[in-house]
Amino acid sequence: MTRRLIAVFSVLIIVFSAGCQLKEEGVENERDIAMNIIDSNSNIKSIALQAEEFTLQDVVDKPFGKALVIGQLGEVRAFKEGYFNAKGDSIGYVDKDGDEIKDVAGVIIDPPEGSITDSYYDIKKYIENENVMFLLLDGFGYHQYEYARENGFLPFLKNYEARKALSVYKPVTNAGLAAIITGTTPEENGIYSRKQRELKVDSIFKQALELNKSTAYIEGNIGIVNTEVQPVLNLDENKDGYTDDEVYKSIIKAIEDGNEFIFAHFHGIDDAAHSYGPLSDEAMERIKTIDSYIEGIVPIWDGVVIISADHGVHSAEDGGDHGEFRYEDLIVPYIIINRGSNVE
């Protein structure tokens, strides 16, 4: 065997071996990474394709209680005794009862108790007896919320408790919005990426209409998911690069018009985070601006206000991004401002 052949053969062995090892400390983007493990505060590790079967306990070094296994199509299963194994170019999971996820996106250990799907059920609970407003802060992850609160960019919302909530995979706007308004995961509602727009289940808007609640759905400059009501679209009329001020004005008008259920979508945090980074000065100033809008809304709204996000944003080389199985993308704040509600 020539020296050149020996060298090539050695390189191939090294490459193959690297692809079969555990990738420690953080989430990577390479396609050979098939499964990421996170918790509510950090990215723990990424698991590469490997021939051997393994259990979650084999690859997680710290003790944990509850865990969720989440698939590429948004499937969610509570972790049970079972094993993971390589299937083609993905990692599958089979539990002790034979339930299977064929293509696992990741595992979250000790997830937060809350989920963005709680939005549907909380709106449904309150709306029967009082007015409800839901404010969707696009791209507002819990780590961004903490940073903004600690650094003076949330002078109003810092006064209200925010609990952690789990978004859905893929953490993109279509999927997150669908989960919020239906109370279901992508596996059930059919919206698991940016491509889908048609829901397979009813949304909270149908519930509001059946209760004869006057309803306003206020969006940015485009509709995201098709629902039972038409959104009020808002163009960037003053050309400041954001539609948030126009959305704010539409909310004020919807309140003045006597609507009993208002669902409004602020897009600016996500826009700024994409361009400049999730913890950048520009993103923080946008958070502070929207915080001031919320401060203007709450005192004139006679009802409950629920605030959450569709997903968060992680730092990237050219600013920020989302859509990956990362704690920054998947953990968001969930706030209920309930002034004098009579609903428990």
Image: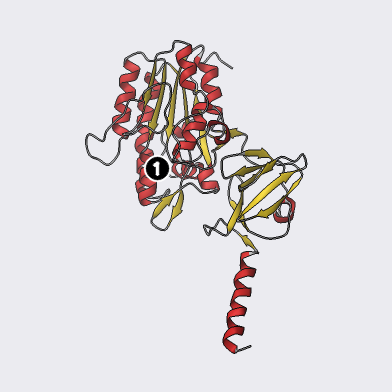
Viewer-closest of 7 and 121: 7
Whole-percent x, y for residue 281 in the image: 36, 49
Whether 197 is drawn above or below 25: the answer is: above
Hey, what amino acid is under mark 1? Asp
Quadrant of the snapshot with the C terminus: top right
Query: Is residue 340 among what the camera can see?
Result: no
Whole-percent x, y for residue 223 in the image: 36, 32
Q: In this view, does 43 lie to the left or right of 144?
A: right
Whole-percent x, y for residue 340 in the image: 50, 16
Q: Is residue 158 left or right of residue 244?
A: right
The quarter holding residue 234 reads: top left
Which residue lies under the disc numbered 1? 270
Q: Which residue is at 48% across, 46% downward?
A: 323
SS assignment at label 1: helix
Total marks placed: 1
The quarter holding residue 212 reads: top left
Mark 1, residues whose alpha carbon is within 10 Å: few (<14), some, or many (≥20)?
A: many
Q: Which residue is at 55% across, 30% downward?
A: 117
Viewer-closest of 278 and 58: 58
- The residue positioned farthest toward the bottom in the image shown: 2
Q: What colour-coding does the image apply? A: secondary structure
Quadrant of the snapshot with the N terminus: bottom right
Q: Which residue is at 47% across, 18% downward?
A: 206
Whole-percent x, y for residue 110 in the image: 66, 42
